[in-house]
């Protein structure tokens, strides 16, 4: 695969041969920006006591599984 341009709208940076070989379609700055935006939508936590870490993507699930929830208020 040869070097191409970033597929993000309005970006004219080149992707680079090494990145294109790995299948990346966007340049490094655009890829970093996309990953930061995607990271805002999930977190890792323990939804059950003595459970394994799990990917939590729903904000309501995160609020309902707080192990330090104050009771009796």
Image (tube, rainbow, N blue to C red):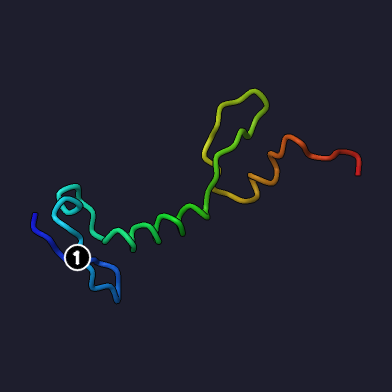
Left or right of 25 in this view: 31:
right
Give the farthest residue toward the left.
Answer: 2
Number of numbered tags placed on the structure image: 1
> Which residue is painted at 20% across and 61% down in the image?
15
Q: Position of residue 42 (x, y in %)?
A: 53, 48
Q: Secondary structure under badge 1?
A: loop
Quarter location, residue 32: bottom left
The residue carrying pointer 1 sits among few (fewer than 14), some (14 to 19) or many (20 or more) residues within 10 Å by Cα, namely some
**Residue 59 falls left or right of residue 11:** right
Quadrant for the N terminus in the image: bottom left
- Quadrant of image for the C terminus: top right
- Residue 69 lies left or right of residue 54; in this view the side is right
Q: Nearer the viewer, residue 59 or 44?
A: 44
Where in the figure is residue 41, as x and y percent of width and height? 52, 54
Q: Residue at x 30, y 58 (%)?
A: 28
Q: Position of residue 19 (x, y in %)?
A: 20, 52
Q: Point out the residue furthest to the top here.
A: 50
Residue sitting at x 17%, y 54%: 20
Left or right, 20 with reference to 73: left
* Near-viewer residue (25 or 29): 29
Q: Which residue is drawn at the image coordinates 65% and 49% (left, top)?
A: 60
Q: In the rendered image, which residue does mark 1 sit on?
A: 14
Measured as percent of width and height from the top left, residue 53 is found at: 55, 31
Q: Residue furthest bottom?
A: 10
């Amino acid at each position: 695969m040869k070097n191409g341009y970033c597929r993000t709208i309005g970006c004219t940076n080149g992707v680079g041969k090494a990145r294109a070989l790995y299948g990346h379609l966007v340049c490094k700055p655009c890829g970093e920006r996309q990953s930061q935006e995607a990271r805002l939508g999930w977190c890792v936590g323990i939804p059950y006591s003595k459970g394994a870490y799990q990917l939590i993507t729903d904000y309501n699930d995160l609020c309902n599984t707080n192990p330090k929830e104050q009771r009796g208020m």
